[in-house]
Image (spheres, helix red, strand yellow):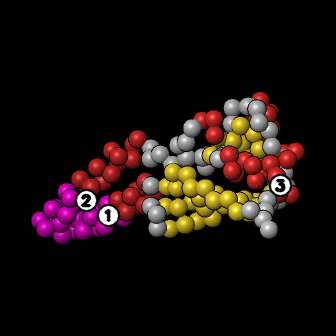
């Protein structure tokens, strides 16, 4: 039976999101008050309300890692309500797992390529580069690894895991 590892990672909200939230709420209130005096402002109120909704939706992001039998799935959870699968790989597609700041990670990352950061705001030493090849193209992401997750990955792909 394959072992099942699940790990939830919270992303720190960017600093400008707090300012943006306050600004959009103030804008909503302003347009709401202006609407009673000038009804055509209703369109601006709708646009401002939609922008506020999307900012609040994307302000709180979590990543859920699910590792089962050599397959890794990463879901992006927006505001604890909607979920979107953003990564799905298997053991045959895996090329390398190495600490983010290691020489192995730096050398393995294709030139000019940037890794997508799915690691949240955890400790820097827990962040690892996960390099895989899908549809003939190398892709890289940064993940926040736990010891349990690393142990399972080492069990399924021992030659592809580097520790330093």
Query: Which residue in the protein does label 3 denote?
Result: 156
Element under label 3? helix
Mark 1 or 3, nearer chain start:
1
Residue 22 point in image, percent of width and height: 28, 49
Mark 2 or 1, nearer chain start:
2
* Residue at image point 55% right, 42% down: 122
Mark 2 or 3, nearer chain start:
2
Residue 160 point in image, percent of width and height: 84, 45
Label drawn at residue 49:
1
Residue most extreme to the front: 1
Whole-angstrom CA distance, mark 1 to mark 3, is 48 Å
Is residue 19 visible in the rendered image? The answer is yes
Q: Is residue 68 above or below residue 150?
A: below
- Is the magenta region chiefly helix, strand or loop? helix
Q: Nearer the viewer, mark 1 or mark 3?
A: 3
Residues rendered magenta in the picture: 27-50
Whole-angstrom CA distance, mark 2 to mark 1, is 6 Å
Element under label 1? helix
The answer to whether marks 2 and 1 mark residues whose Cβ atoms lie closer than 8 Å is yes
Say left or right for 47 vs 4.
left
Q: Nearer the viewer, mark 2 or mark 3?
A: 3
Say left or right for 10 vs 71.
left
Label drawn at residue 28:
2
Image quadrant in which the C terminus is located: top right
Q: Is residue 164 above or below residue 120?
A: above
Element under label 2? helix
* Residue at image point 55% right, 52% down: 9
- The picture quadrant where one finds residue 161 is top right
């Amino acid at each position: 039976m394959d072992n099942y590892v699940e790990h939830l990672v919270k992303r720190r909200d960017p600093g400008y999101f707090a300012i943006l939230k306050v600004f959009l709420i103030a804008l909503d209130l302003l347009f709401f008050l202006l609407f009673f005096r000038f009804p055509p402002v209703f369109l601006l109120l709708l646009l401002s309300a939609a922008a506020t909704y999307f900012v609040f939706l994307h302000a709180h992001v979590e990543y859920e890692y699910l590792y089962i039998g050599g397959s890794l799935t990463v879901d992006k959870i927006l505001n604890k309500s909607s979920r979107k699968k953003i990564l799905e790989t298997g053991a045959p597609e895996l090329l390398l797992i190495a600490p983010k700041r290691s020489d192995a990670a730096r050398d393995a990352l294709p030139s000019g390529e940037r890794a997508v950061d799915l690691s949240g705001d955890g400790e820097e030493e827990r962040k690892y580069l996960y390099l895989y090849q899908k549809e003939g193209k190398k892709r890289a992401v940064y993940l926040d690894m736990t010891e349990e997750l690393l142990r399972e990955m080492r069990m399924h792909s021992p030659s592809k895991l580097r520790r330093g």
